[in-house]
Amino acid sequence: MFNFQIIYQSKKTLARIGKIITHRGVIETPVFMPVGTQGTVKTMPPEVIASLGYTIILSNTYHLYLRPGPDIIYELGGLHKFINWKKLILTDSGGFQVYSLSQFRKITEEGILFKSHIDGSEHFLTPITTMEIQRKLGSDIMMVLDTCIPYPLSYEETKILTDLTHKWAVESLEYWQRHKNEKQAVFGIIQGGMYENLRKYSAKFITSLEFDGYAIGGLSVGEPLEIRNQMMEISVNYIPHNKPRYVMGIGTPLDIIEAVIRGIDMFDCVLPTRNARRGTVFTSTGLLSIKNASFKSDSLPLDPECECYTCRNYSRGYLRHLFHAKELLVYYLLTLHNLFYYAKLMEHIKIAIKTETLEELRGNLAEYYSKYVDNSK
Amino acid sequence: MFNFQIIYQSKKTLARIGKIITHRGVIETPVFMPVGTQGTVKTMPPEVIASLGYTIILSNTYHLYLRPGPDIIYELGGLHKFINWKKLILTDSGGFQVYSLSQFRKITEEGILFKSHIDGSEHFLTPITTMEIQRKLGSDIMMVLDTCIPYPLSYEETKILTDLTHKWAVESLEYWQRHKNEKQAVFGIIQGGMYENLRKYSAKFITSLEFDGYAIGGLSVGEPLEIRNQMMEISVNYIPHNKPRYVMGIGTPLDIIEAVIRGIDMFDCVLPTRNARRGTVFTSTGLLSIKNASFKSDSLPLDPECECYTCRNYSRGYLRHLFHAKELLVYYLLTLHNLFYYAKLMEHIKIAIKTETLEELRGNLAEYYSKYVDNSK
């Protein structure tokens, strides 16, 4: 069972509030998915993630495939049981990590040959093998294998990689039609790089295939914001209204609201969790680095406006001390705060959609986050 | 307010159940204190520690003195508020860390000159300065400065260091009489190394001074178990019946019950927390290393007999995966398990005292832990 319903369509923008209904539960969109790379959202007991209001997390097929391996996870009852997470999981295809982490890779018509970043062992990832791995993991939403298109890249090369993405999408869907089950959904991915007509071409092709939802891939790879927004708009234009739209790997608070305004429903990003481990937190007045000497004996919480566990109980002075002493507790406390911030951000966005005040919220976020660019990739 | 009451005195051994009553609350003895070196019991949110039943933790004066410094902690409302721990805190004097961590140290009649292990800066720790630091921290139980006596050490040298401990104890108490407050208690420390008559000499001298409780120092430094037990027995013999007895830095499950049988009320040790971070956990059938390849696809919890959060929710296979992937969550999950084990151990010991079955419990622990020696120092 996988069903998407639109609860409210903004009258001023493409933004909408929706519901994804699955056998494992219902999630409201727009939704942000914390990233649980290796079978854990770093530092977070799953109950804490759920207590912040999260209903879905993302896990990385590449990492889990290499370690501990899909067979072990399958034997131990599937990914949900393995990691003790009772809500939804979306798994990516592994394509992006092969692209970004592997020392060596070779793309062929059939798939991607790569060497593990852990032990250098050789592996061959194909549209079929990634589906097989994700079936073993038992994720609720599976992503098809696509190609990663860097920016900038020539038109010709972009076209070749986009066509390969299309070929793989077809193969994935054919495989899925033979092995369908009621518990998993499959999303297709639109590519096309930063070329207007290639985006249209890819959006048209991918949305002609019967997927449960559609992702817009290849954004946030260093392109100017206007181009990103344009590519998003082109892609959304082709995605059926009644299917969830997912923009992968985005982003900053401002990135997210810009995408929501353009009709995007689903997000994932390492920013809140990775920033936390580097001592950077999101606040109602912008970013704050807990490392600063000025916080040495500061009795204020990270964000006096915030009501998270960390802000209710700890001073900047204490958190700075823990960070400098490399105490493990600090990574938990800062991650919790940042995930709380992102959860609240999504709540505020939903309220703003319903009250038709998205522009005001965007203005507010722009005041504090307009200079903040996501360098996480 | 600091009051110690004996609730039950074992008829077969020196073991007893007691209550320490302070302005901040009541703790039952025998009690184990998790170690919070730098203002945090590593990886543990304080509420989790409290939820396991702990009523008192130990914090290290040496570490907090060097970083962030007692003045910052004082400015931020004292150690309890700083670290968000609402129950009791015992602080040591710093003497042991100066001995074990500092690259350079020089003992004089007045105190110990040492260099910080963090930045090499020079500091001079005296009986008075450690009291001043602990007053600023606002701990509930303060320890006086003593000398650390290695094993083996000649009689003459042991005598000199023991006499210095006595001189410092007198100075500490004189200082305290001038600066007494109702919220803090002070414990003296018996030394005397591993020489029977020096232990007697030190126990007699230290217990002649009016402290709120008495610690037995200098044990678990590599001495044979029989000698340790003998030194403990000598010391306990001199400590007034109505004062809490604390043996510092001990120990393994078996060490603890051996000490309880000899009349000890209070314990602290890094074993449960440090072992956890190294992948070693305490179970009802002995130690287990989560690193073992045999746990790769093991669906059992760490200890099928255990009811802690970790054992109720996670398989050995998952925990092994997290440990090998160096995922921060695993240090939390294993620490929680080990602290749960120690909390339950203390509960079982209290029940065994009341039911006069300490010998059976010792036999049971000896079966699984007799070969386990604490190398944590």
Image (cartoon, coloured by chain):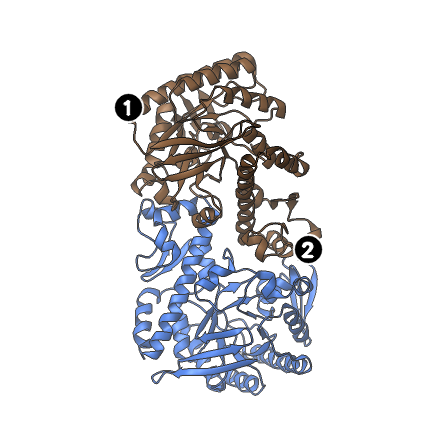
Chain colours: A brown, B blue
The quadrant where residue B175 appears: bottom right
For badge 2, the amino acid type reads Lys
* Subunit bearing disc 2: A
Q: Nearer the viewer, residue B151 or B336?
A: B336
In this view of the protein, can residue A182 be seen by the observer? yes
Residue A82: percent from left, percent from top: 36, 44
> In which quarter of the view is residue A69 placed?
top left
Q: Which residue is mark 1?
A: A178
> Is B127 placed above or below B377 here?
below
Q: Secondary structure at mark 2?
A: loop
Residue B278 visible in the shown view: no
Return the mark for residue B16: none
Q: Disc 2 designates what residue?
A: A296
Which of the marked residues, 2 or 1, is nearer the chain's N terminus? 1
Q: Position of residue B160 (x, y in %)?
A: 60, 79
Q: Percent from the top left, x then y, of residue B244?
A: 49, 80
Secondary structure of residue under mark 1: helix
Q: Is residue B216 placed above or below B328 in the rendered structure?
A: below
Q: Nearer the viewer, residue B257 or B99?
A: B257
Question: How many discs mark residues in the rendered view?
Answer: 2
Q: CA distance from mark 2 to mark 1?
A: 61 Å
Residue depicted at x 54% and y 27%? A14
Q: Chain of mark 1?
A: A
